[in-house]
Amino acid sequence: MNTTPPSQGIFTPELLDRCISCGFCLPACPTYALTKDEASSPRGRITLMRALEEGTLPDNDLRLQEESSFCLGCRACETVCPAGVEYGALLEEWRDHQWQGSRRPLVVRLLTFAVNARPRVWLLGLFRRHARTRPSPEGPHLMLGCFERALYPKVSRAARALLPELAAPASQGCCGALHAHNGDSARGRELALELGERLPGVIVTTSGGCAAHLASVLGRDRVRELSETLTETPRELPRTGARIALQDSCHLRNGLGVWREPRELIGRMGEYVELPSAGSCCGAAGSYAMVRPKDSRKVLDAKLDEIEAAGVDYVAVVNPGCYRQLDQGLRRRKSRVRAVHLAELAAGAYETTRSARTQAEH
């Protein structure tokens, strides 16, 4: 008699079966650190996924809905997993199933609607002074980002000041990361492929989350994060005398393994200060800060304590979501520490050097 539980076809079996429930992931998980609840850990959530797959728990189970939302999706668990569990892929499959119709958070529905078509993305930055150029037939191209072009237009201008060879057409659309991480991975893949067609050649991003998603669809050879490109094509950057910390982008560090490069750049500009939790999530996590603002702030508070205790002048970021999270948090505290994108920091230093040279030559 076959006693194997029936499969619902929600998850890729090879991904779900890889977890051996060893528990190495627990100390790496920010939400488990908040609650000490097994169900709020990667191991516990995979147990819930298995129950959903086997039909033991129904789709509308409240714990399934809660934990699919409570997870930050930071993928820190992947870096410590001895079995190589691809938790990020499992989370996407879970939300693809769990977040259907009215079960998808309203904020997520609004955000994905806003970037689901190129004209809408173009409108986001219409009245903002982000970088704008004509497309290049061969690249390289700068990915402008959806909300980054509206919230932080200086970032793309800074990137082009550092790498003027980058083309930045305003007509480019969304990369699909927002969809992929929030219950519509099929559309997320479609948007990434569309962007890859519109931006031929290498695509350079100033967003760690977008870089990881694009690389997973287009291939690693076509996608570079800004700090990678800058360390491959060194620019002379003056030492500013500032003490500078870094907040890693979770997907950039945990998904693409890029973390040394931003530290190298910062070390060339000032005194680099490593925060104890630089590699852990700040609570932004894409749409998370808007979907679950209270939990997001709980994650952020300890981070802000660290930043202020470190006595730094700047905390550099490599992702627009982290930028918004840290900037707003530091402003609420009336902190003297300033959040700044690494591109802005590097471009400011580079402009200082160029101005000094121009004056010396004349």
Image (tube, rainbow, N blue to C red):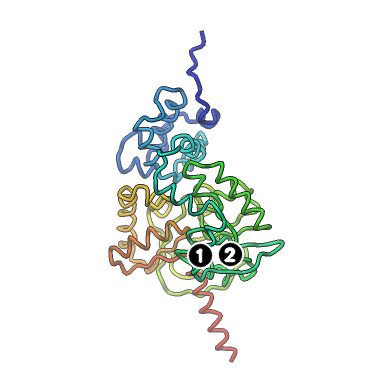
Extreme left residue here?
333
Residue beneath label 1, please?
125
Q: Which residue corresponds to the image point at 54% horizontal and 83% vertical from the top-left?
A: 355
Dots 1, 2 in contact, CB < 8 A: yes
Q: Which residue corresponds to the image point at 36% horizontal and 66% vertical from the top-left?
A: 312
Q: Nearer the viewer, residue 172 or 245?
A: 172
Q: Which residue corresponds to the image point at 55% horizontal and 88% vertical from the top-left?
A: 359
Q: In x, y percent, where is residue 12?
A: 54, 31
Left or right: where 243 falls relative to 227: left
Q: Amino acid at mark 2?
A: Ala
Relative to 227, say whether 75 is above or below: above
**Residues under labels 1 and 2: Cα distance?**
8 Å
Extreme right residue here?
137
Residue beneath label 2, please?
170
Q: Quadrant of the C terminus?
A: bottom right
Please tell me how crowded label 1 is: few (under 14), some (14-19), or many (20+) other residues with Cα within 10 Å: many
Q: In x, y percent, where is residue 185?
A: 53, 42
Secondary structure, mark 2, is loop
Give the image quarter of residue 51. top left
Which badge, 1 or 2, comes first in the chain's sequence?
Answer: 1
Relative to 359, say whether 51 is above or below: above
